[in-house]
């Protein structure tokens, strides 16, 4: 199946690590030109080097941008406009991270920060890049979200609530932006990326090795496929939903979780 990415332009926020980096890599492999952003300069440099290996520097723009900083997002959109020829075919809103906290341990400021991150990492890039999307032939937005939106966990209380709100936002946008722009999401279970690597590195028992720690994690979470996902697995789902091959799909959500959901 031809996904139809040849000559298209895509943006992947948080495209410097994990799922975002793999999404950018596959999009470039498929023939797209891809702009990625992140905050950390070292991560950005490493991603630039890795992605340039796929089809050279011309297929790539790597820029520093915090997606919660309105001025920085505007500057990034301007850079994308110049580099991409004034058109954007796909926006992947992927930047972010989860917050582990119960209701008792989440302060009011934590709540505000989490709601800000989850909502505005969607809102600001969509607002800033919408004029470029409007100029594309068959534009699409894909939001990277979590299964916590539908299956909340008490130990991630504010992340779960914010995730549910983001699903609502994306569903509304699918209607408001139709028929011009398709809007879809993926909802993730546990994917082995920067976030989990950091939690592994901060593990209480330093004697536990990586394989054991990840194996125990998969079993404790009851994942039917008995492992965490690899970043390229959700990335492939993003690439499909964002492609012209998914032309009749909008307002949809694709679960990529190894089967861990317990609802129908
Ligand atoms: P990583 O930590 O590997 O990657 C996160 C990326 O987002 C990095 O490139 C990071 O770069 C960037 N980022 C974070 N905050 C910002 C910001 N404010 N502005 C710009 N870039 C930012 O994590 P994953 O690949 O796992 O995560 C991708 C998405 O999937 C995230 O939204 C995450 O919450 C979500 N998710 C992941 C799950 C998992 O199990 N891995 C489960 C459910 C959801 P930098 O820090 O340099 O800015």
Image (spheres, rainbow, N blue to C red):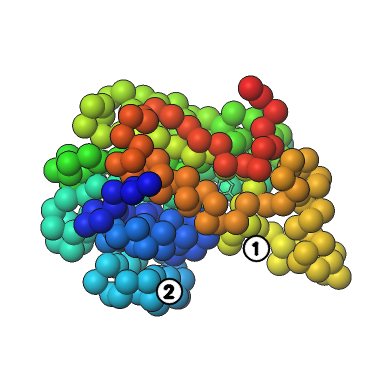
How far apart in space, not on screen, are marks 1 and 2 (Cα)? 21 Å
42 on left or right of 57? right
Q: How far across and down, in percent of the image, does residue 156 sit?
A: 66, 40
Residue at x 70% of width, y 28% of height? 262
Up-down relation of residue 66 to residue 158 (above or below): below
Along the line of sight, the residue nearer the viewer: 28 or 184: 28
Could you tell me if residue 162 is visible in this image?
Answer: no
Say the numbered circle drawn on residue 187: none
Q: How far across and down, in percent of the image, does residue 31 sit?
A: 30, 60
Q: Secondary structure at mark 1?
A: helix
Q: How far across and down, in percent of the image, does residue 148 sit?
A: 61, 35
Asked if disc 1 and disc 2 are in contact, CB closer than 8 Å, the reply is: no
Residue 244 lies in quadrant: top left
Q: Is mark 1 within 8 Å of ligand 1?
A: yes
Question: What residue is disc 1 on?
Answer: 198
Along the line of sight, the residue nearer the viewer: 141 or 244: 244
199 on left or right of 88? right
Question: What residue is disc 2 on?
Answer: 50
Pick out the residue farthest to the front.
1
Along the line of sight, the residue nearer the viewer: 56 or 132: 56
């Amino acid at each position: 199946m031809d996904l139809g990415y040849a000559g298209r332009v895509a943006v992947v926020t948080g495209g410097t690590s994990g799922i975002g980096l793999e999404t950018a890599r596959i999009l470039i492999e498929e023939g797209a030109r891809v702009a990625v952003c992140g905050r950390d300069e070292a991560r950005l440099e490493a991603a630039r080097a890795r992605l340039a290996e796929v089809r050279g520097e011309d297929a790539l723009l790597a820029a520093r941008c915090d997606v919660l900083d309105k001025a920085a997002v505007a500057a990034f959109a301007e850079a994308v406009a110049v580099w991409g020829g004034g058109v954007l075919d796909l926006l992947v809103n992927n930047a972010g991270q989860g917050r582990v906290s119960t209701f008792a341990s989440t302060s009011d400021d934590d709540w505000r920060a989490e709601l800000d991150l989850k909502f505005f990492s969607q809102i600001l890039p969509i607002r800033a890049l919408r004029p470029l999307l409007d100029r594309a032939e068959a534009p699409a937005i894909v939001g990277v979200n979590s299964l916590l939106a539908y299956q909340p966990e008490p130990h991630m209380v504010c992340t779960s609530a914010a995730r549910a709100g983001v699903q609502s936002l994306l569903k509304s946008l699918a209607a408001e932006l139709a028929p011009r722009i398709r809007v879809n999401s993926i909802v993730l279970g546990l994917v082995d990326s920067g976030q989990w690597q950091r939690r592994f590195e901060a593990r209480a028992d330093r004697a536990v090795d990586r394989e054991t720690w990840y194996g125990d994690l998969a079993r404790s979470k009851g994942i039917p496929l008995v492992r965490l996902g690899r970043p390229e697995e959700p990335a492939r789902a993003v690439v499909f939903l964002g492609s012209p091959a998914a032309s009749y799909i909008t307002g949809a959500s694709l679960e990529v979780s190894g089967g861990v959901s317990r609802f129908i």
